[in-house]
Amino acid sequence: MRMDYSLYSTRTADPAAPQILKSLRAIGYSLEAAMADILDNSISAGAKSIWINYVWSGSETSVAFMDDGCGMNDAELLEAMRPGSKDPEDERASEDLGRFGLGLKTASFSQCKMFSVMSRRAEQQVVFLTWDLDFVCDHSRKWELLEYMPKGDWADELGKLESGTIVLWNDLDRLVGGVRKDDPKAQKLFEEVMIKAKRHLGLVYHRFLESRKVKIYFQGREIEPWNPFLPTHSATQSFPEELLDNGRVKLRGFVLPHQSKLARGDYERAEGINGWYAQQGFYVYRNERLLLGGSWLGLLRKQKLYTLSRIMLDLPNSMDGEWQIDIKKSIARLPVGYIDRIKAYAAAICSKSAEVYNHKGKIISRKNITEENFQPVWFEKQKHGHRFYEINRNHPVVLNSVQTNLSPLLHLLEETVPVNVLDFSAGQNVEDVSRPFEGEKLKELKKLLKEMYGVLIRTSTPGEVKSRLILIEPFNEYPELIASL
Ligand SMILES: Nc1ncnc2c1ncn2[C@@H]1O[C@H](COP(=O)(O)OP(=O)(O)OP(=O)(O)O)[C@@H](O)[C@H]1O
Ligand SMILES: [Mg+2]
């Protein structure tokens, strides 16, 4: 239905500057996501180098971002400082990392109460402006900027570049509010948060850093790219790319090497900030900039067996609406039309991951001992094309507890194994698999392990007992407990 607006009179409901600015602070940025929004602007402005610097001064600590991009003139800077400086529905240059005309303001205000931008286009004069929350809320109560730049040799720094921009965050109340400069604990915490942010930026921009399109210096040191796919490792399996929507969306799956094939450094690097298990899933890139990583986007649940699967998912900036890219550039939602194909692709990669995970997992816990020695609790067997499970009657714990005739009971258990629930094939929503007896039941396992040790030690040396235990399910999952016996 099309309304005839001329029929109605109107009333104005202008937003109130203090309230809106305060609310913009609550969009939910993390420090690293906020930093990335500032860096996005530098990259979109064609920067080849970006410098992030800070000097610890307690609550007076400031963070400066400088780039050698195209810079802005006076009118452009004023426009840049305006919340909603661009229409989110406008078509953007294919390399532009922006969308909403908000990032500079929302990201900065999420971390600080005052931020200043100084900029210079080639052969033009330096311009600067400051948004100050206290000024807007307590004095002007209007959408008013200050023609002010905090003290520092910022203009000299910019003068060394042909063109460029500095974004300066001051009064970082959320990070260092009310903190004294001589508080070593606070300083340590601050440094830790910064290091985490630095690592995150190495992941978000790893493709730019690898191709040397841009260099990012953090406190003077170049940030190393962190590629979550370990593509150069000889044991990484890289799968053929799948193109959707005429190549606008691209998928490329990787199954990372099992831990046993990784040198310690590689293992720790691949584990990233959140650990191996958390890193499985899609890595969604928009114009090669990572939006989010380590998520199955609601298609699958995380499982140990999928730990080694990571899938690169590439989007152009022309699909922002369809994929519901958010202001923080850290959310993307899978459009319904893609679900089937993307799920099928992910399922194939996950089943490969499960193969590598299972296979190598067994080998690692058995060390160099042949497979026949291994004592599982269950045997998987086939009869007339159907899978069934049989309890291993020679399993030491089973043998030890069979004093009367337990055969009928064992048989009953075998007949009632809920095979379909245990099906780990990729793509099925199965609860996460933990180690048997993990968590609260660990006490039970320890008791069982001690008992077993007591039985076996009657006929063997402690060393022999330990090497037998590592072959017995479920003790094989707990080498650390066996070692500590
Ligand atoms: N470092 C910079 N160098 C040159 N121009 C910049 C820089 N930072 C911001 N701008 C200009 O300011 C505008 C507004 O930036 P802002 O981050 O608020 O929005 P955006 O990048 O357009 O979209 P988004 O909200 O998605 O980030 C940019 O579109 C760009 O024109
Ligand atoms: Mg931006």
Image (spheres, rainbow, N blue to C red):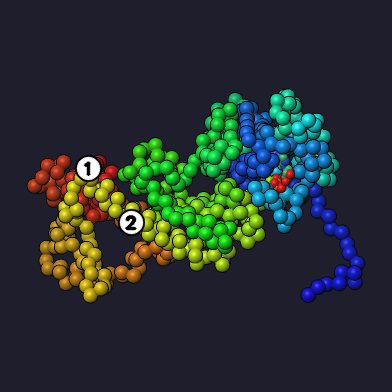
Where is mark 2, residue-wise?
355
Tally of numbered discs: 2
What amino acid type is highlighted by mark number 1?
Answer: Leu
Q: Is residue 431 visible?
A: no
Q: Nearer the viewer, mark 1 or mark 2?
A: 2
Q: Residues within 10 Å of mark 1 (few under 14, many from 20)?
A: few
* Residue at horizontal 65 percent and vertical 30 percent from the top: 61
Q: Is residue 295 above or below residue 113?
A: below
Q: Is residue 219 above or below residue 354?
A: above
Question: Residue 213's image quarter?
Answer: top right
Question: In the displayed structure, does residue 267 sit left or right of residue 188?
Answer: left
* Residue at horizontal 60 percent and vertical 37 percent from the top: 214
Where is mark 1, residue-wise?
485
Q: Is residue 432 above or below residue 268?
A: below
The residues tagged by marks 1 and 2 sit, at their Cα atoms, a distance apart of: 32 Å
Q: Residues within 10 Å of mark 2 (few under 14, many from 20)?
A: some
Residue 299 lies, in percent from the top left, at 49, 62
Which callout, 1 or 2, points at the residue further toward the start of the chain? Answer: 2
Question: Residue 181's image quarter?
Answer: top right
Question: In the displayed structure, does residue 413 sit left or right of residue 221?
Answer: left
Disc 1 vs disc 2: Cβ atoms closer than 8 Å? Answer: no
Q: Nearer the viewer, residue 357 or 178?
A: 357
* Residue at horizontal 50 percent and vertical 52 percent from the top: 312
Q: Nearer the viewer, residue 420 or 405?
A: 420
Q: Is residue 310 above or below residue 485?
A: below
Q: Nearer the viewer, residue 409 or 38?
A: 38
Residue 53 lies, in percent from the top left, at 62, 30
* Residue at horizontal 23 percent and vertical 48 percent from the top: 366
What amino acid type is highlighted by mark number 2?
Answer: Glu
Q: Nearer the viewer, residue 259 or 139?
A: 259
Residue 25 lies, in percent from the top left, at 69, 47
